[in-house]
């Protein structure tokens, strides 16, 4: 019998918008796909779904059609030229920004039967801290918090971490500094935030790699491409490949901490 495996499931949040959450989700997904991982990107940013733009995917159907019962999960999975498969967010559905927690569970359960089709699932959640955002982050097995070195982003990252680790008792929280001048600056930002969370929340964070500021990010975005494929030699592409490499080196989960995690039946089979 084939060895049971559980996909790597990473939720990407930031609190504040505009710090590079979607850029990180898309490029991490593409970098994982380039190593041969069958990668699915779930755009759970219902209000401002733009992962499909970043990947150059034209998608007539999206999460709203799954939630309304008009389409099955398979019918809303789209291939992209970047090698990643995409479940588009529900841009345009008026009440989508206020997606209910119950609907998050519907999406999580719909993916369960597809466990053997993917090696990695990356979830781009919305900005802010709505119940749906925390429900998605709780459903993910690991949580990446994207942060920029500026006061409002740091405050929002801290607020997000606080909710995830105190109200939701979640661990597996990783800080991903973005738009930093150097890796050393990324590490410094991590240590600053980690000291604060340790002191005030009694919780330490994990760290893998930072993403440097790189104007080629914008050039790639304008061409509906990932920087990883558009400018493979750029600093940002190199950083996303490093982030993906470190993410793949993470060991098996030792326990489940979320409420209704993605691929629950597999986690149970694995004895977690
Ligand atoms: N490392 C980076 N260097 C330069 N620009 C970046 C970087 N990361 C993101 N950006 C730019 O910042 C803007 C916001 O990024 P986006 O991923 O849409 O943020 P969010 O999803 O958090 O709202 C985009 O124009 C993107 O190209
Ligand atoms: Mg975004």
Image: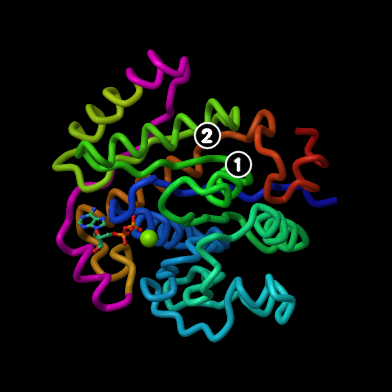
Residue density around tag 1, few if under 14, some if 14–19, many if 20 or more, within 10 Å:
many
**For the residue labelled by badge 1, is the local secondary structure a helix, a strand or a loop?**
helix
Find disc 1 in the rendering and name its residue: 138
Whether label 2 lies within 8 Å of ligand 1 gets the answer no
- Is residue 149 on the magenta stretch? no
Q: Are marks 2 and 1 in contact (CB under 8 Å)?
A: yes
Q: Which segment is the magenta one?
A: 195-224
Is residue 221 found left or right of 117 in the rendered image? Answer: left
Task: Give the vertical position of 262 relative to 65 (above or below).
Answer: above
Where is the C terminus found, in terms of image quarters? Answer: top right
Question: Compared with residue 200, is residue 8 higher up or lower down, i.e. above or below?
Answer: below
* Residue 51 pos. (x, y %): 42, 68
**Residue at which label 2 appears:** 164
Quick check: is the Cβ at mark 1 less than 8 Å away from ligand 2?
no
Q: Is residue 116 visible?
A: no
Q: Residue at x 65, y 77 (%)?
A: 65
Quadrant of the rendered structure where residue 209 is? top left
Position of residue 246 measured from the top left corner of the image (x, y, whole percent): 43, 40
Relative to 215, 256 lies left or right:
right
Residue occupying the point 43% across, 26% down: 205
Q: Is residue 225 left or right of residue 30?
A: left
Q: Residue at x 38, y 36 (%)?
A: 175
Please say if 191 is above or below 264.
Answer: above
In the rendered image, residue 214, in percent from the top left (x then y), is placed at: 17, 56
What residue lies at 31% left-to-right and 41% top-to-bottom? 147
Q: Quadrant of residue 52?
A: bottom left
Distance from the alpha carbon under mark 2 to that under mark 1: 8 Å
């Amino acid at each position: 019998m084939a060895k049971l495996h559980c996909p790597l499931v990473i939720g990407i949040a930031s609190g504040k918008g505009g710090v590079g959450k979607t850029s990180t989700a898309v490029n991490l997904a593409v970098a994982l796909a380039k190593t041969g991982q069958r990668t699915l990107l779930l755009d759970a940013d219902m209000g401002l779904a733009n992962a499909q733009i970043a990947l150059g995917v034209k998608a007539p159907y999206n999460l709203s059609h799954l939630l309304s019962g008009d389409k099955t999960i398979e019918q809303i999975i789209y291939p992209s030229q970047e090698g990643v498969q995409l479940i588009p967010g529900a841009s345009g559905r008026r009440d989508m920004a206020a997606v209910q927690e119950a609907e998050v569970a519907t999406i999580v359960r719909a993916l369960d039967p597809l466990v053997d089709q993917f090696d990695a699932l990356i979830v781009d959640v919305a900005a802010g801290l709505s119940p749906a955002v925390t429900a998605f982050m709780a459903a993910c097995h690991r949580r990446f918090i994207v942060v920029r070195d500026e006061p409002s982003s740091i405050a929002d990252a801290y607020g997000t971490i606080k909710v995830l680790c105190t109200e939701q008792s979640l661990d597996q929280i990783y800080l991903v500094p973005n738009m930093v001048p150097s890796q050393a600056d990324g590490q410094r930002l991590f240590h600053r935030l980690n000291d604060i969370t340790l002191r005030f929340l009694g919780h330490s964070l994990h760290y893998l790699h930072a993403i440097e500021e790189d104007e080629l990010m914008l050039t790639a975005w304008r061409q509906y491409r990932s920087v990883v494929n558009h400018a493979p030699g750029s600093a940002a592409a190199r950083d996303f490949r490093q982030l993906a490499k470190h993410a793949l080196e993470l060991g098996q989960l030792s326990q489940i901490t979320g409420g209704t995690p993605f691929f629950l039946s597999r986690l149970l089979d694995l004895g977690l």
